[in-house]
Image: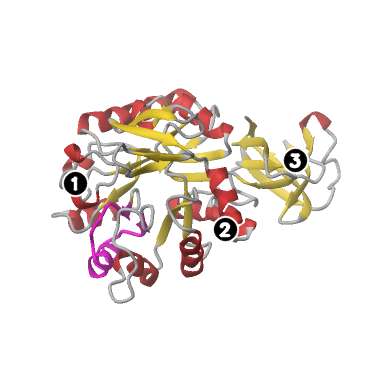
Amino acid sequence: MILKNAKISGEIKNIVIKQGVIEAVTAEKAAGLFDNEDDVIDLQGKTVIPGLIDVHTHGICGFDTMDGDFENIAKSYAKVGTTAVLPTTMTMPVEMLSDVCRKLREYKASLNGEVKGADILGLHFEGPYIALSRKGAQNEAYVKKPSVEEFSTFSDVKMITVAPEVEGCMEFIKEITKDGKCIASIGHSDCDCETALRAMENGANCLTHTYNCMLPLHHRNPGPIGAAVEKNAYAQLILDGIHIAKQTVLATYKMFGPERMVIISDSLSCACLPDGEYESGGLKVILGGGCARLPDGTLAGSSVSMWDCVKKATEMGIPFEDAVIMASRTPAELLGVKKGRIEEGYDADLLVIDDNMNIERVIIGGQKM
């Protein structure tokens, strides 16, 4: 496949894709480049950006990670421009978490190299090893102390949200991150700055939905956010315009920069659906006015897509190119995958955007969705 006359960072170029990977990005018409017209798509100057990567999302379009219907989950994310994803679990019984892992293994085995939707890179476990005091919209009945032995029974867990002050969690973080296969992210935690620093020295390198369900950034008690600034860790932010105020988003962008700030949706299965009553993690969720809350008013996650978050970031004053980086390149680097760049050797996960900021075409692994 060749994408002809694609606007990349303001310049018109051609993108050559072979076997799901970007083979070349060139501004010149090489000899014979467009000979096979059946394999050429003329974008006529439309903008192309890397596909969006969501490392924290519980579901979308009526499909929930906990249900394990990964084929429909992958297709639904692809429809809204999320080309790679870490479906995120809730704090639930071990048996249910194990079942989700099994269903993902079965889905991945069934693909046989076929691209059916968003690339599922693994799971993000949000809990169950968190602090009761900061449970947020997680079910407190299943909150527990961490166990390396128990965690080793799960598969495909690429990221886990943990509270480092919980008994045994420092050793847990050190053990699960030592081979680089799993990312420990601090969240749903009451830890102070010193504890967060120790957790980062033991291998944690990310904050889960920064500001939400953690101590705030105080000028004398900077908490985990101050620790993340000092240790150059990554900071996830929910950019739905509800969870975090515009001014705080801009301050965080200036503190972490596009290289370390990661846009997430933290979407629930009710994302992109009409207002009404839904369920998440066994709890009732009420969606109204674009906001998902528990019956007691607790924010329960978002109802937006990653593309909605990118557009919201630009509305808040973040340059569009930086917003795209924080939703593609930066999460790719956090995960250690060759995605998020329109460069030779990177996965051909791309979005074509029209002049009205609508997604016109989604390409995943070199395949048109």
Q: Are marks 2 and 3 in contact (CB under 8 Å)?
A: no
Where is mark 2, residue-wise?
Answer: 316
**Label 2 neighbour load within 10 Å: few <14, some 14-19, many 20+:** some
Q: Give the residues drawn in magenta, as a range.
A: 184-207
First in residue order: circle 3 vs circle 1: 3
Where is mark 3, residue-wise?
Answer: 3
Judging depth in this view, the residue of 23 and 235 nearest the camera is 235
Spot occupied by residue 285 in the image (x, y as percentages of width and height): 35, 34
Which marked residue is nearer to the observer: mark 2 or mark 3?
A: 2
Q: Are marks 2 and 1 in contact (CB under 8 Å)?
A: no
First in residue order: circle 2 vs circle 1: 1
Question: Could you tell me which secondary element the residue under label 1 belongs to?
Answer: helix
Judging depth in this view, the residue of 198 and 236 nearest the camera is 236
**CA separation, marks 2 and 1?**
41 Å
Q: Quadrant of the C terminus?
A: top right
Where is mark 1, residue-wise?
Answer: 148
**Label 1 neighbour load within 10 Å: few <14, some 14-19, many 20+:** some
Residue visible at 59% across and 53% down? 324
Residue visible at 33% across and 68% down? 227
Q: Quadrant of the N terminus?
A: top right
- The image quarter containing residue 307 is top right
Amino acid type, mark 1: Val
Which residue appears farthest toward the left when viewing the image? 167
Judging depth in this view, the residue of 226 and 39 nearest the camera is 226
Q: Is residue 57 visible?
A: no
Spot occupied by residue 21 in the image (x, y as percentages of width and height): 62, 42
Which residue appears farthest toward the bottom when viewing the image? 220
Which marked residue is nearer to the observer: mark 2 or mark 1?
A: 2
Spot occupied by residue 186 in the image (x, y as percentages of width and height): 30, 56
**Label 3 neighbour load within 10 Å: few <14, some 14-19, many 20+:** many
